[in-house]
């Protein structure tokens, strides 16, 4: 039965948007936790660990996200691990996000001048104290802009999971397109919903990056 | 848990994989050529700022940077035939990926153009250089040097992003992989092999960018632009 694109279709898409948002949130939290651990280990860890993390980052950044998603969904089931699409999607997106956020945050930590570490040393701070009171607060301020900017990438990247059949916004669009045969209306609406989520994040990210330079002037 | 990986059935498809890799290379090369050209034109339009044109470019950039490539691809492949423009999957892929890269490279190139002070252009003209010489030696190459890491990073993302074109069955590596996978059901081995080929392609591209960089920036480096020194300074200010 061919139905036409109407208000109930928009409702259907908005309903699916909740899954996009949930997956984005899961990815950001998981990827953020591991990204922070990786960033710290990359800066402070023993040499072999540093190399291992650098290698991981390089490999993931040179693999298409879609292939990671396929490996997690189709591939791992052959090892006797079956993941439902949501979990497979969350695992692969988090691995991807870890590599990128870890790299971004490592850059932020490394951009804190050496003297800050030395000053903290001179005050006889322990390593956790140095991180907590001196390094991380400054690194956090630098990282805000790029981190929010990467959130946009995360939201957009969740669209790839449509290809393993996870019914988020893009997949819902595909399904709706198959029902209505009105691709222009359907995908324009889908794009508009993504834009509504992503544009404010992009805007905030730009403002945060800009304000750092304003801060410099004073 | 006793699963034995068998790459034999995948290696039997080596010619298909090679063909896929070549298609991916060609798709990326076309998209990069068109996308960077779009980016260059739009960046110039935005910096030279005729009001309306600049606004239009800004809208294009924001729309394409804030929606997923997959949705752009669907819009172009499924949506354009409705207005009478029927494109093949391959052409749609080049079209969508170029427009996507165009939006990102506009912002990157614009940052480079802004980094060149107007006074340098005036100095060049005062020394009797022709307009073309000024554009080449004073604007483009120094600007390119500032943005080179960001631009090549974006080009790498574009190469990897071509895998998304498999969603509309354009001919490229991921589609080739999916076909092999559905022929022998060795999913893990197939996608691991595909991942390895992408990694090799990425490394090859990075090597080429590095070579191009050596050739482009073969002249003596000027003192670093202050833009780069910003980040540590922010730490001190805090």
Image: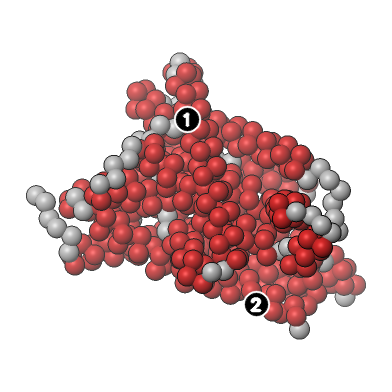
Which residue lies at the image location 14% right of the left edge and 58% below the top edge?
A4
Which residue lies at the image location 69% right of the left edge and 46% below the top edge?
A54
Mark 1, chain letter? B
Visible residue check, residue A5: yes
The residue identified by callout 1 is B23
Which residue lies at the image location 29% right of the left edge and 65% below the top edge?
A14
Indicate the secondary structure of the residue bearing disc 2. Answer: helix
Looking at the image, residue B211 sits to the left or right of residue B155; the answer is right
Visible residue check, residue A19: no
Looking at the image, residue B129 sits to the left or right of residue B173; the answer is right
Percent coordinates x, y for residue B152 in the rendering: 64, 47
Question: Which mark identifies residue B213?
Answer: none
Looking at the image, residue B159 sits to the left or right of residue B110; the answer is left
Quadrant including the C terminus of chain B: bottom right
Query: Residue A56 or A142: which is nearer the viewer?
Result: A142
Q: CA distance from mark 1 to mark 2?
A: 44 Å
Percent coordinates x, y for residue B26 in the rendering: 51, 32
Query: Residue A90 or B164: which is nearer the viewer?
Result: B164
Mark 2, chain letter? A
**Label 1 in the same subunit as label 2:** no
- Mark 1 vs mark 2, foreground winner is 1
- Decide: is B105 above or below A218: above
Rate crowding at label 1 as few (under 14), some (14 to 19) or many (20 or more) other CA atoms within 10 Å.
some
Query: Residue A98 or A48: which is nearer the viewer?
Result: A98
Percent coordinates x, y for residue B106 in the rendering: 56, 57
Indicate the secondary structure of the residue bearing disc 1. Answer: helix
Percent coordinates x, y for residue B88 in the rendering: 33, 37
The residue identified by callout 2 is A211
Quadrant including the N terminus of chain B: top left
């Amino acid at each position: 039965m061919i139905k036409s694109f109407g208000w109930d279709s928009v409702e259907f898409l908005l309903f699916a948007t909740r899954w996009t948002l949930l997956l984005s949130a899961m990815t950001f939290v998981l990827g953020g936790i591991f990204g922070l651990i990786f960033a710290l280990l990359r800066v402070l860890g023993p040499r072999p660990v540093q190399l291992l993390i650098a290698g991981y980052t390089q490999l993931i950044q040179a693999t298409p996200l879609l292939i990671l998603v396929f490996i997690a969904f189709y591939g791992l089931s052959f090892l006797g691990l079956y993941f439902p699409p949501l979990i497979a999607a969350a695992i692969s997106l988090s691995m991807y996000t870890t590599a990128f956020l870890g790299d971004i945050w490592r850059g932020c930590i490394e951009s804190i001048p050496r003297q800050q570490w030395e000053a903290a040393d001179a005050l006889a701070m322990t390593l956790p104290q140095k991180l907590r009171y001196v390094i991380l607060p400054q690194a956090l301020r630098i990282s805000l802009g790029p981190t929010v900017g990467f959130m946009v990438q995360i939201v957009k990247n969740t669209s790839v999971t449509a290809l393993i059949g996870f019914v988020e916004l893009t997949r819902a669009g595909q399904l709706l397109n198959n029902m209505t045969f009105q691709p222009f209306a359907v995908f324009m609406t889908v794009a508009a919903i993504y834009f509504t989520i992503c544009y404010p994040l992009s805007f905030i990210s730009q403002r945060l990056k800009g304000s750092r330079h304003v801060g410099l002037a004073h | 848990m006793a699963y034995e990986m068998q790459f034999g059935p995948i290696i039997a498809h080596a010619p298909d994989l090679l063909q896929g890799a070549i298609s991916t290379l060609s798709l990326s090369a076309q998209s990069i050529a068109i996308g960077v050209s779009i980016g260059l034109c739009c960046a110039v339009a935005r910096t030279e700022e005729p009001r309306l044109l600049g606004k239009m470019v800004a809208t294009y950039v924001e729309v394409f940077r804030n929606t997923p490539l997959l949705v752009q691809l669907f819009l172009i492949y499924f949506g354009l035939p409705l207005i009478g423009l029927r494109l093949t999957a391959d052409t749609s892929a080049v079209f969508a990926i170029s427009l996507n890269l165009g939006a990102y490279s506009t912002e990157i190139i614009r940052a480079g153009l802004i980094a060149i002070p107007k006074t340098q252009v005036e100095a060049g003209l005062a020394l009797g250089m022709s307009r073309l010489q000024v554009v080449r030696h004073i604007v483009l190459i120094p600007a390119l040097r500032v943005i080179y890491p960001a631009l090549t990073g974006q080009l790498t993302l574009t190469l990897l992003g071509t895998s998304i074109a498999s969603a509309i069955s354009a001919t490229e590596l991921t589609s080739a992989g999916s076909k092999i996978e559905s022929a022998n059901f060795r999913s893990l081995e197939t996608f691991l092999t595909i991942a390895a080929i992408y990694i090799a392609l990425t490394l090859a591209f990075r090597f080429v960018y590095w070579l191009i960089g050596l050739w482009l920036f073969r002249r003596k480096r000027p003192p670093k632009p202050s833009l780069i020194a910003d980040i540590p300074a922010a730490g001190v200010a805090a």
